[in-house]
Amino acid sequence: MNRLARLDHLYVWHPFTQMRDWLRQEPIVIVSGRGPYLRDVHGREYLDANASIWTNLHGHNHPGLNAALIRQLRKIAHSSALGLANEPASLLAAELVRATRSSADRTRPPTQRLCKVFYSDDGSTALEVALKLAFEFTRRTRGPRSKPRFLTLQGAYHGDTLGAVALGHIPLFHQTWRPLLFKTDAVMAPYCYRCPFNRAHPERADARLYRQCQWECIDAVARRLETQRRRRGEPYAAFVFEPLIQGAAGMIPQPQGWLRRVAELLRASGALLIADEVMTGFGRTGLPPGPPPRPASAPLFACQHEQVSPDLLCLAKGLTGGYLPLAATLTTREIFDAFLGRYEEFKTFFHGHSYTANQLGCATALENLRLLRTRASFQARQRLEQALAETLPALWDLPQVGDIRQVGLVVGIELVRDWTTREPFDLREQAGIRVCRALARRGVLTRPIGNVIVLMPPYCITPRQVRQIVESLILACEETFGTHPPVRHRRRSSKHPAPPSRQR
Ligand SMILES: *Cc1c(COP(=O)(O)O)cnc(C)c1O
């Protein structure tokens, strides 16, 4: 075994990983990357089909991001935001406020538009900040007898720190920690493929498109809000949601119009809206339907697709283009003002991290936003969205494919034992894990969510490489479930990847 792999086995404990299984085989040790490719210690190259857990946007080793990072590094790497301002943090905050503006803001009073940025380190901490701000804002505006309570969606995932875990509703991840947590409520999420109210028989198409229902999921939200008011005498403090698509829940997309209507219900009830765009932000959800906008003003956030303007917006993963851990929680003047007062009133927001507003992260994030505004990036995103839409239907030929869900540049493919009944695989069979292992042997890396295969490559990937991913996935499924002979991964250069047909 390679020395680095051996050291990993000796000393490293990996996240979300059964380490007993991990220790049974030599891990892939990444030493470099370029564009959509990752390269391991043995010189093998892999397509990064999940953008390094949903973070990378423009590809690895990007000249523009590298240069921005090095320019900043020559000045300073970090100085504290506790008591000091800094150059890239100031510039980035202004750009974030500008980028998150939405046409829906016009329907809100000026004090309820996003205009302040609180920095932290990752998605979980961005959510912690939003939670604490919403909690304290609610008590300050409703009075000390208020008991702020949060509403989230079934299958919600908002991070792994305890506040974020309290918002989560994935039993496998969250159940263990319940005794440590405050209570939150979950309401029905629109999971059309497995919705008990969807009377449509399974078809070879995205379940959102052929569903037969009466929006019972929205009625469920209305009933939930009514119950909260009746039982507890006050509305929810806030509704926390992933707009357009729930990620870790299994790439569960919302049918068009769901978010806008639910957001209106929540607003009318008196709750704040906390949008978790940790995964969906920075162009991931593609372009909204309608005439294409100018590249420099194309919407980059999922909330903008449904004309929702939240009171708190959480950003992380793609914020630095996948380079560095940095997060931001944006909020309104109304919430900001609730923390103003004479010093001795102690209304200060007592929260912060050592690396808050880190200069290297902020400088890289600024360049990321600049790149996203270019015509080249806009066209790359359009090209990728279209390549996925054209390539994915080939997967319907596989009997184990139950649902294919694409939202912009994000794809979830749900594997099932029997597509005609939607009968799922038992998690213990590790169908998703086995398919992804077979994919890795073909030079494509991604991580499943249970039985859902995730595809969300960096924006720089070419249509040809997208086809390569999908063809590899077909072969990986055939190998896993059928009689197809296994293949060995071949060494090749990123400039001249072997056509997938040669790898059969
Ligand atoms: C990944 C993720 C988080 C947590 O972010 P970390 O950076 O892993 O802490 C929160 N919300 C959503 C929607 C995510 O996808």
Image (spheres, rainbow, N blue to C red):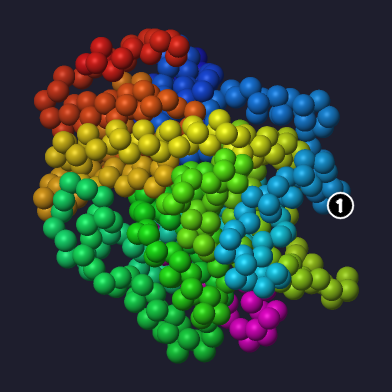
Whether residue 438 sits left or right of residue 97 in the image: it is: left
Whether residue 152 sits left or right of residue 353 in the image: it is: left
What amino acid is found at the position of numbered circle 1 in the picture? Gly
- Residue 441 seen in render: no
Q: Who's the residue at 77% across and 26% down the image?
A: 71
Q: Who's the residue at 42% across and 14% down the image?
A: 44
Above or below residue 194? Residue 358 is above
Segment tinted magenta in the rendering: 135-155
Across the whole image, how many numbered discs are drawn on residues?
Answer: 1
Above or below residue 478? Residue 247 is below
Q: Who's the residue at 36% across and 72% down the image?
A: 218
In the rendered image, the quadrant that contains the C terminus is top left
Above or below residue 275? Residue 230 is below
Measured as percent of width and height from the top left, residue 95 is found at 70, 47
Whether residue 266 sits left or right of residue 470 in the image: it is: right
**Along the viewing direction, whichever of 218 and 168 lies nearer the viewer:** 218
Above or below residue 404? Residue 158 is below
Is residue 179 magenta-colored? no
**Crowd around label 1: few <14 · some 14–19 · many ≥20 (10 Å):** few
Measured as percent of width and height from the top left, residue 36 is found at 47, 25
Is residue 154 magenta-colored? yes
Q: Who's the residue at 17% across and 65% down the image?
A: 199
Q: Which residue is mark 1?
A: 83
In the rendered image, the quadrant that contains the N terminus is top left
- Residue 90 seen in render: yes
Measured as percent of width and height from the top left, residue 410 is found at 41, 43
Measured as percent of width and height from the top left, residue 101 is found at 63, 56
Whether residue 253 sits left or right of residue 39 in the image: it is: left
SS at circle 1: loop
